[in-house]
Image (spheres, rainbow, N blue to C red):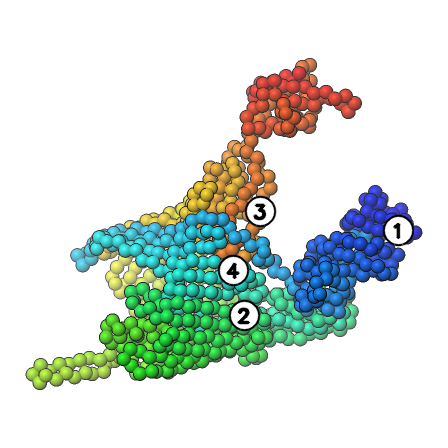
Amino acid sequence: MKCKALIRNGLLVNSIGAALYSCCVFGESFNSSLLVGSAGSMDWNNQAMVMTPGEYEFDVYVNDEWKGKFPFKVTNGKEGTLQIQASQISMLDIRDISSTATGGAEYIDIDTLLHGGKSSLKPGEMRVNLEVPQAWVNKSDRNWVAPEKWDQGINGLYTNYNLNYYSFHAKQADYSNTDNIYLSLNSGLNLFGWHLIDNSTYMRYSNTGKGYWRNSTRYLERPFASLGAVLRIGDAYTSSEYFDSIRFRGVTLNKSRQMLPDREQVYMPVISGVANTASIVNVYQDGHVIYQITVPPGPFAIRDLMPTGSRSDLTVEVKNSGGGGNVETFVVPFSSIPDMLRPGTSDWRFNAGEVNVLNSGDDTRFMQFSYTRGMNNYWTLYSGLTASSDYQSWLAGSAVSIPWVGSVSGSMEQARYQLPGDEKRSGEKYTISWSKYLPSRTNITLASYYYRTQDYASFSDYIATKDNIEYYGYNGITRYSKQAFSATVSQPLGENYGRLSLTAYWRDYWNNRKSTKQYNLSYSNKFNSVNYTLSLRRSEYNQSYYDYDYDSYKGNQSSYLRSQRKSENSVYLSLTIPMSIFDSPGSISTRTSFQQGKYASTDLSVNGTKQDVDYSLVLTNDNDAKTRSADLYGSWDTSWSRLSAGLTEASDYRQMSMGASGSLLAWSGGVLASGSTGRSFVIVDAPGMKNATINGDSSVRTNASGKALVTNAVAYRQNNFSIDADEKQDSDVDLLGNIMHMAPYEGSITYLKYQTDTRRLFTLEARRENGEPLPFGTAVLDGNGENLGYVSQGSQLYVKAEQMPQRLKINVGTRHKRETCVIEAPKEGVINVCR
């Protein structure tokens, strides 16, 4: 038989023979790469090898990518039929197959799931190969983790703090001495997956002698993986891509794009095509390969392309993987703008509650909703709605990527409202934005323009104007902005010739009340290691106001509309020279400015880093103010806080500052501190591992009990943690496994417990009664037979135990004779006798 011939020709006769049942029925798997000669490349899936009907577990590969072990049923027939357990099919990452799992069947024919592909079975390897047109395969992101594996975390309390003290001492009579304290707290209480978030500040001024607490937000938060959204209840700010943000008290439910795979968070086109044979697909941008994939025959779709920073078109090449045949090439136009989403993805945000603006008594109830949808490669639609009793607005817009034109987005919003004591009004706002990367490498990042009719008011404008009317008795100038334009254009000038960039901004108001214009042209380049930038800036400002004149003799009052115009031309030159300071990286920088054609000021700074210390020295000469100053600043990163201090000595004042920032976290196991702040925390617990670094970061070290606080975990992604023991520490602690993984919810507190051996290490000298050394490598046991160590070279014993055992047993027998000797009351520093 062919099966017996294969066995005779292989080296691994015992391994294969144990895997065979009835000559050709296999019950275990083996790695064919271990076979020698031609056995590893032979076709083990031949017609002569028929699986006995029954239930098996196979390794499944979809387009040569392993998906895991799955339960299968092999049915009767000459070639046999493979049926997969219906409850497992979603884990194959094949698109649009859920509709096939109907009728309540426990097993489903695997061929019905392959969209025209094919399956093959290799009984010798217990492997099933599925060849599926690539367009029907979901490709998982490298760092993304499925929601069922996200860690909700433990209960705990934390705060991120930033404390600063300033002491100002005046050298002139016009100024007064002050001592000020500023404290910022971002705190959270986590209980059973819910997060109570509070953001508050405290300020104390010596000239008033009083302190002031101010709360900006306080809300209850809960992420919901099933909705892909985050719920907030309390005092917060509205969140919308298209409406102004306003503080309110109520409910927010926003889709969390952080929960999505990386490919769904940013815009890139989906590249589709058809491969006539097994092919290699290359995607080029600016002449460089940015993506490559091998696809089977049939339709393919590349959905996980990520941005490279360039915005030029994509060239796609499809060629036979065997090297023969025609090569198909086509171009996919590409241009992006912030409003665009990937095809098939969406974003939505919902807010409902009452206005709760600080220092305002307005409590208008309102509802706000916005929705965005990526329709296809070139078209994204979005809309929004805001509604209250006396204010309603709706918005509709679209973003389009047009070949050779670029990306264009536009929207129209209409607002209807009624202010106290006023008639109903309505107005519109029109916006348009354009972004384009030209063949000349000219990058128009964003050119945007908006126009507001005179009676248009956003919801925040409406609330502010209503507040002015009710509390101050006048209609403030909160809704008279007419139009604004901004643009950023950059142009590289070729290798070694630098880059030129231009930014422009202007804005004016109805009735010529005010207008502002700013233009900035800059050139930057690098000479050897020296970076330099030359900037030209022009600012224009126009303010109109009424001047009142009262004639006391006639009792008449006259008003005159006056205008104040101001323009300013500035030139800035900056240089940065990297250098080594105290054998550590540093730099020297200088910046000189000219105003209206005259010298204005110069700054000279020295910056550097030495291990965990950052420092800077800045010398300033302000010609306009006729002052000079020297600023010395330093900060020290510790494992428990970031400490800073500064001193400024100027011509007319002296200022000293001190600060501390970091985070504190309390949970059932104690309290931890860190010098960094964060949102998603991880408690690393390695009992006994003192002063060990986490992930090679010297600023994150374990304390005396082996615990450390990590503040920068990435939510909904796999985070890897490793511990490096402090080589300066003389420790007996052994780490049992160094790598751990976790994927936290945003805002969670995750606990990671490492397994360590904290028993003491004892080193003993021992001999047999006749003076001979003990057998090398022999296990050392205690009186209960527990293995505590081994015999090393030179008859030296290494024993790990909580305390020195009273008795040690060592096997000194041979293969034919069992014999042990015992050391009673062993001691270090002496030669122990094993009797």
- Tell which tag, 4 or 3, sits nearer the viewer: 4
Instruction: Read off the residue under disc 2.
Output: 346
User: CB under 8 Å between callouts 4 and 2?
Assistant: no
Return the disc, 3 or 1, that comes first in the chain's sequence.
1
SS assignment at label 1: helix
Residue 3, above or below 309: above
SS assignment at label 3: strand
Q: Position of residue 113 (x, y in %)?
A: 72, 65
Q: Distance between the residues labelled 3 and 1?
A: 44 Å
- Tell which tag, 4 or 2, sits nearer the viewer: 4
Residue 619 or residue 254, whichever sits in front: 254
User: CB under 8 Å between callouts 3 and 1?
Assistant: no
Q: Is residue 667 left or right of residue 83?
A: left
Mark sitting on residue 740: 3
Q: Quadrant of residue 550?
A: bottom left
Return the disc, 1 or 2, that comes first in the chain's sequence.
1
Return the disc, 4 or 3, that comes first in the chain's sequence.
4
Instruction: Read off the residue under disc 4.
Output: 224
Residue 406 or residue 799, whichever sits in front: 799
Crowd band around label 4 with a 10 angstrom C-alpha radius: few (<14), some (14–19), many (20+): some
